[in-house]
Image (tube, grey):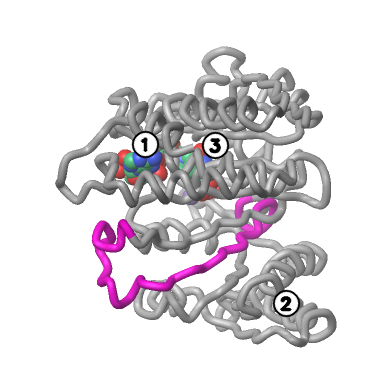
Amino acid sequence: MRANLVLLPGDGIGPEIVAEAEKVLRHIASEHGHDFEFTTGEIGGCAIDAYGDPLPDKTLDPCRNADGILLGAVGGPKWDDPNAKTRPEVGLLKIRKELGLFANLRPIKPYSALIDASPLKRSIIEGVDILFVRELTGGIYFGASRTEQIDGEEAATNEMTYRVSEVERVVRVAARAAQTRRQHLTSVDKANVLEVSRLWRRTAKSVVDKEFSELNYDVVLVDAMAMHLISRPRDFDVVVTGNLFGDILTDEGSMLPGSLGLLPSASLGEDGPGLYEPIHGSAPDIAGKGIANPLATILAAAMMLRHSLGLQTEADQIDAAVEKVLNDGHRTKDIAAGGSAINTTQMGEEVLKAL
Ligand code: NAD
Ligand code: IPM
Ligand code: MN
């Protein structure tokens, strides 16, 4: 297969972890006789530094024609000035919006070798297998915003809006995923307080009733979900929710496997290329030290092979290699539970050896 892949390393640990995922992709290509062509582009803070724009057309245009896009992370203290003209995160939101990537798949499945690396008890996390489907191009992230004077003091507003069609399409993605899994779909909202959540709830139920009535469907309020996620995570299969709630719940969910450095994601639209990235950020506290865990990004590369290129066998091989490396006891610092740890490149090398 010929594939045109765009790498967007970004900021902080982004370049360190994408480098390891790139090696894995090149290895897969040579083992299976694929022709992967790589293009690298700037997004986020490094693009602000180079072009004054967190997502210049020079980066976005090749992405539109790509078969898949692999992103590291954006952001960092260097670009955090609240008075700055633009921010790294604007580039990430723009690429998601421009490419129509409304469904963000975030699987959470603890590794048996790491059960004791999680802050949660073995009895809680054993057997957990959740797929979060986070709406990614709507809600409060993309609503109108303003800062203004109200009664003589400064006030700021962000609006949270969902249209019926935006809820329908993401619920369909989640429901189709549930059909291939354990037939259980949970929708998470805040319908006891928010008008926008009441529309979300009505719409989600109507899609399920009309098109997926065979599914076991339930609804949970987001505050309760934050608790259920760590008290009875085994009870969930596919969870669909809005942009902000999905962002927060999945960082919380990363404590089930034990580290943000283990969770990949796929951002998908109706057609066109998917964007694949770890769910974590640029980790400024460890950037440049060479100790970041590259596994989330390597697993994101596997998701790219599976979802955008249809290379199921190759994706399974990467997943199995990661599992083997962990079974063999290799640990980066974030999952070492105080024990001895290897660095980012060594972890990448172990995955290559396991492949
Ligand atoms: P973060 O996810 O970068 O880091 C949170 C904690 O997790 C840190 O202690 C970090 O060291 C650790 N961590 C994250 N990834 C790790 C990895 N691969 N290996 C080992 N440890 C890891 O979140 P933050 O510190 O709140 O945000 C830092 C910056 O990243 C901010 O500018 C934020 O906007 C940005 N961010 C970007 C993305 C993205 O690009 N998709 C996602 C989240 C945050
Ligand atoms: C994520 C990140 C982003 C988000 C930020 C950096 C814009 O936290 O991908 O989870 O909130 O979507
Ligand atoms: Mn996040």
Give the magenta range.
113-141
Of badges 1 and 3, the one in the foreground is 1
Q: Is mark 3 within 8 Å of ligand 2?
A: yes
Q: Is mark 1 within 8 Å of ligand 1?
A: yes
Of badges 3 and 2, the one in the foreground is 2
Q: Give how far apart the Cα atoms at labels 3 and 2 are.
A: 29 Å
Please name the amino acid that badge 1 sits on: Ala
Element at label 3: helix
On screen, residue 13 above or below 204? above
Residue linked to disc 3: 89
Residue linked to disc 1: 283
Please name the amino acid that badge 3 sits on: Glu
Q: Tell me, yes or no, if residue 169 can be seen here.
A: yes
Residue 160 lies, in percent from the top left, at: 64, 61
Residue linked to disc 2: 204
Q: Is residue 145 magenta?
A: no
Along the horizontal axis of the image, is 231 left or right of 94?
left
